[in-house]
Image (cartoon, helix red, strand yellow):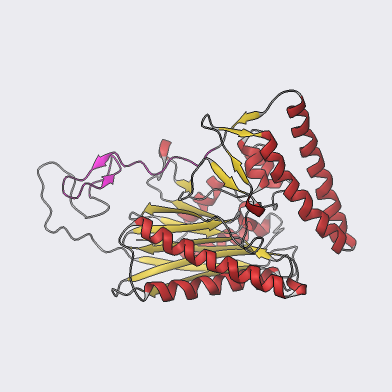
Amino acid sequence: MGKAPDEVALPGGQRLRLAASDTVSLRELQMVVEKGVAYWSRRRESAEGVAREHAASALKDLALIFDNLATQIAQGRDTVKITGRLPPQRQAPRACPFCGRGNREQAQYCVACGSPLRPGVRPATHAPPPLHVTIATRTNVGKVRQINEDTVYAGEFTTADGAIGTLLVVADGMGGHQAGEVASALACDTLKTRLTAVLSTGVPTDDAGWHEILRGAVTDANHAVYTQAAQNLAQHGMGTTMTVAVVTARRAHLAHVGDSRAYLVNAAGVAGENLTWQQLTSDHSLVARLVDIGQLTPEEARVHPQRNVVYRSLGSDPTVEVDTASQELAQGDWLLLCSDGLINHVDDTELAQTILAAPSAARACERLIALANERGGKDNISVAMAHVN
């Protein structure tokens, strides 16, 4: 990611630092839990009925986690080794003799310039074959919620040099009726406005340039949500996650805040051990950190009552840390952005299998949402997808 991998940011300017030995401080992890306690305390004070009971239950669960961490500290344990990381990126050991780009070992043609990789064969042209990108989006309120607070977008844009690119956005709003939906829509609209203005004047020439543009656009979105929440009592405390992908020139450039996710899927494999899927973002959530330190398994995290407690989102503070990354794209790639309403019900392997079995991006979106709803649909479900073919 664009931000140092040994650090996560907490609201209010605090940070959770990971030591060089891949360990995390238990005292600093307590700050993440305290943030969750403060959030649910506010919800309990302002809610009634079932919502108030839910907040009280969440506080009870957090108290147990906090007690566990305090006990470990009292026993002299200051740090815990991290056990979970994102999968390794796409393996590319075979260098193209003409442009130098790395390729998979079994590749016959270079993913970047299209040159044949067989010894002694020169390409007819150095121009890479064009990639065709098919996009689709779907969003659904689910089986439990009354309002859909998610915002999802997929569309094409034109840069200053005339190139056509693709933009995908998923934003999962938080804050209840008339707040979460406002936050996610406002963040998405602000991001699109900033990107349109910047890309109409110039186009980045490298990954770092794209990261700077995306970081600025997400920062603008954070400012818009934070300002509107501060000026409107009914929307106080609203916020949203945001995961963004810009696809252009055979690469995907990502920006990310919160616990919505981006995945790369390809039947030919995208990561070590021939995995057909790769998670491209790291969740900024309490349960993700608890998985990291071994206190929860990934399966337990999927159904944990605190799975929706995020320690980084748009609108919670005047400034925000934005993760950025870039990913080379190849023939057959599926790029998926989704809200946690999907991943709470569909695990990564089944997610990839469902996408690869679908005849189109639109049908893949429909089937993923249907799966989540078949299993309870406890949250809003949103997916944005780009298929490279």
Question: Which quadrant holds residue 32?
Answer: top right
Q: Between 355 and 247, which is closer to the camera in this rendering?
A: 247
Viewer-closest of 79 and 155: 79
Please state which of residues 141 and 236 is positioned toward the viewer in this rendering: 236
Describe residue 21's horizontal placement relative to residue 346 as left or right: left
Query: Does the rendering let one see residue 362?
Result: no
Residue, x 49% and y 55% (percent of image)? 355
Q: Which residues are magenta?
A: 85-109
Q: Residue 37 location, x and y as percent?
A: 78, 49
Report which quarter residue 292 is drawn in: top right
In screen coordinates, is 367 left or right of 287? left
Apparent side of residue 75 relative to residue 5 in the rendered image (left or right): right
Tell me which corner region of the image, top left, top right, bottom left or bottom right, holds residue 331: bottom left
Q: Is residue 213 magenta?
A: no
Q: Residue furthest top?
A: 75
In the depicted structure, whether residue 202 falls above or below residue 387? below
Q: Position of residue 205 (x, y in %)?
A: 30, 61
Whether 92 is among the magenta residues is yes
Quadrant housing the C terminus:
bottom left
The x and y percentages for residue 271 are 41, 42
Could you tell me which residue is drawn at 59 percent across and 60 percent down? Answer: 319
Q: Main secondary structure of the magenta part?
A: loop
Residue placed at 48% from the left, 68% from the top? 136
Position in image of residue 131 (x %, y %): 31, 63
Q: Residue at x 39, y 58 (%)?
A: 252
Q: Kindly tell me whether residue 328 is visible in this rendering.
A: yes
